[in-house]
Image (cartoon, grey):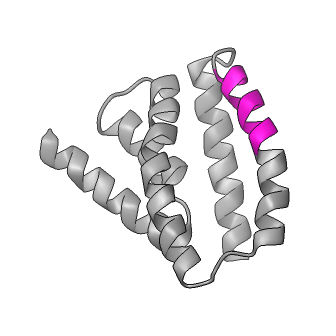
Amino acid sequence: MTAKLITIGLITGICNGLFGSGGGTILVPCMVFFLGLEEHKAHATAIMVILPLTVLSTLIYYRHSYIDWPTTLKVISGGVVGSFIGARLLNRIPPSALRKIFGTFMIIAAIRMVF
């Protein structure tokens, strides 16, 4: 089990460093399908795991001057409010609906990235 968790973390960390994502796209499906976590716990746990990964990636991106600060600050202002709303809504959405919403979002994001 420990090796499985470390492997999931390694893959997530690499994706986070390369693409700026990994928490939702890698962690949530892995936790649900490979670890058997309930949907709500998987989403909440992914957010907690993402925090240190994001801090480390941010420091490296900052060191290389990759951050567009005006854009970052504007997106953060909406993101903080949206994060609060999303976290509050999570408890109100049934697991089956949450899985469908998340899956639909991932499919749309994948299609947009390819085209």
Magenta span contains residue 62: no
Where 49 sits versus 13, above or below?
A: above
Quarter of the image where the N terminus is located: top left
What are the residue bounds of the magenta stretch? 80-90
Q: Name the chief secondary structure element in magenta.
A: helix
Magenta span contains residue 83: yes
Task: Please provide percent x and percent y for residue 28.
Answer: 46, 41
Where 73 sits versus 101, above or below?
A: below
Q: How many marks?
A: 0
Where 115 sits versus 56, above or below?
A: below
In terms of image quadrants, where is residue 42? top left
Between 69 and 8, the one nearer to me in the picture: 69
Q: Is residue 21 left or right of residue 111?
A: left
Extreme-bottom residue of the structure: 64
Residue at the image position 24 percent from the left and 45 percent from the top: 5
Q: Is residue 59 left or right of residue 72?
A: left
Residue at the image position 29 percent from the left and 34 percent from the top: 35
Q: Is residue 1 left or right of residue 37?
A: left
Task: Please provide percent x and percent y for residue 55.
Answer: 49, 57
Task: Please provide percent x and percent y for residue 44.
Answer: 51, 31
Task: Please provide percent x and percent y for residue 13.
Answer: 38, 61
Between 46 and 34, the one nearer to me in the picture: 46
Residue at the image position 64 percent from the left and 34 percent from the top: 100
Quarter of the image where the C terminus is located: bottom right
